[in-house]
Amino acid sequence: MIELAKKHGDGPTSLKSIAQTNSLSEHYLEQLVSPLRNAGLVKSIRGAYGGYVLGGQPEEITAGDIIRVLEGPISPVEVLEDEEPAKRELWIRIRDAVKDVLDSTTLEDLASYTDGEQEAYMFYI
């Protein structure tokens, strides 16, 4: 998604080029792009010069949007109702803080953070 944000407005980008740039498996990216496409976060363009583009503007798509599509609801742990009130409150505050950061960080932000620093990100497969 960061690669697509960096190339926003330049036309479609192939998964093969993203895989090569980031030393990732193209097969892995194919698995990720399907739910992102279904959620409208990316669009596929067919044809000889096809590939993928963002489904919206980089400043409108947040890290939270992407994580929810790929991982589900944002929660570091499942907060149980019968948990000790102080612990329960702590976990709720942690969850809300993580959500706030993810929902206020856009793809535009992430793309600008990584300009020239591609090796700063580690992808876990």
Image (spheres, grey):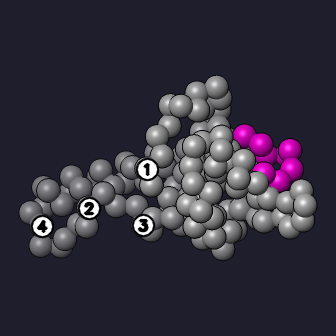
How far is disc 3 from disc 2 in space, using C-alphas?
11 Å
The residue lying at 50 percent from left, 37 percent from top is 121
Relative to 57, is 31 on the left or the right? left
Q: Residue 116's image quarter?
A: top right
Kindly identify the amino acid type of the residue bearing the numbered disc 4. Glu
Q: Amino acid at mark 3?
A: Pro
Q: Is residue 125 left or right of residue 116?
A: left
Assess disc 1: are there few (<14), some (14-19) or many (≥20) residues with their C-alpha within 10 Å of its C-alpha: few
Reading the image, the residue beneath label 1 is 124
Observer-side mark, 1 or 3, equals 1
Of residues 88 and 107, the one nearer the viewer is 107
Q: What is the CA distance from the residue labelled 2 to the residue labelled 1?
A: 20 Å
Query: Which residue is farthest left?
Result: 84
Instruction: Residue 6: name its quadrant.
Output: top right
Mark 4, residue position:
83
- Residue where numbered disc 3 is placed: 73
Per the model, the C-alpha gap separating discs 1 and 3 is 19 Å
Residue 77, which numbered label?
A: 2
Q: Earlier in the sequence, mark 2 or mark 4?
A: 2
SS class, disc 4: loop
Residue at the top extreme?
Answer: 116
* Residue interval drawn in magenta: 6-13
Q: Secondary structure at mark 1?
A: loop
Residue that appears at 79% across and 59% down = 51
Does the segment drawn in magenta span residue 56?
Answer: no
